Amino acid sequence: QKEVEQDPGPLSVPEGAIVSLNCTYSNSAFQYFMWYRQYSRKGPELLMYTYSSGNKEDGRFTAQVDKSSKYISLFIRDSQPSDSATYLCAMSRSGAGSYQLTFGKGTKLSVIP
Amino acid sequence: GAVVSQHPSWVICKSGTSVKIECRSLDFQATTMFWYRQFPKQSLMLMATSNEGSKATYEQGVEKDKFLINHASLTLSTLTVTSAHPEDSSFYICSAGGSGEGVYGYTFGSGTRLTVV
């Protein structure tokens, strides 16, 4: 079993839809959870950064962490064509920048106008 | 916010030559730099971790003599692909980690697309 599992998709939704992206993980030591957006041929861009369980909202994006189920989600409201990208979940045992991240495979999202 | 500059953004080189990729943290001190490789439609594969002033730690299966990493200062790390071959063609991405907690720990460069012909 891989440490982090993420459905690679592709996921295609109409503009304005609510998008739900998910990852599961097996290592209970993970405490910090991140979501990155990666456009084609670009580096990943940090979208959300959360610690432990709970919800965090930033504009149209909401990140949820359920440590009891080892399950994290990213919700995108009112999705736009500009949201079309690959979304990577990542997690770490520590929030210190010196700790490496463990990534999911990424989910490719297409938002159709 | 935290900015990591990586260049070149793309490079084409001949087989057998060496290529250097630079990664700079512009507005924070990066005590740790991570180098990743990404194949098409795949996730990021960690190649090595480098701490300023010390030797890099390579992941299993990554040839340290082929992928030379230098992290001589708190703002600059370089990856040199030596004697490049077509199978080294890939997308290379760096990320910079600060000494403290927070989002500054996980900022990525824009990536370098290497094509070896």
Image (cartoon, coloured by chain):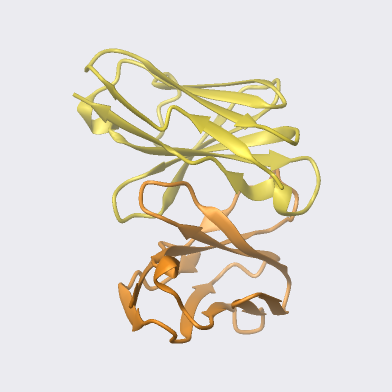
Chain colours: A orange, B yellow
Q: Measured from the top left, where is residue B50 in percent x and y?
A: 61, 30
Kindly give the residue lying farthest to the right in the view shown: B100
Kindly give the residue lying farthest to the front in the view shown.
A113
In the rendered image of this protein, does residue B59 appear above or below residue A34?
Answer: above
Could you say which is closer to the camera, residue B66 or residue A26? B66
The percent coordinates of residue B94 (x first, y second) are: 53, 38
Residue located farthest toward the bottom when viewing the structure as drawn:
A17
Closer-to-camera residue (A39/B87): A39
The quadrant in which residue B38 appears is top left
Question: Which residue is drawn at the image coordinates 36% and 52% (left, top)?
Answer: A40
Decide if residue B60 is in sight here.
Answer: no
Quadrant of the frame with the C terminus of chain B = top left
Q: Is residue B23 visible?
A: yes
Residue A80 in picture, x, y percent from top left: 44, 75
Q: Is residue A56 above or below residue B5?
A: below
Residue placed most toward the observer, A17 or B39: A17
> Residue A47 placed where, x, y %?
59, 63
Q: Residue at x 50, y 83 (%)?
A: A78
Please, is residue A21 above or below residue B6 in the view?
Answer: below
Height in image: A75 above or below B28?
below
User: Residue at left 55%, top 71%?
Assistant: A26
* Relative side of A113 to B28, left or right: left
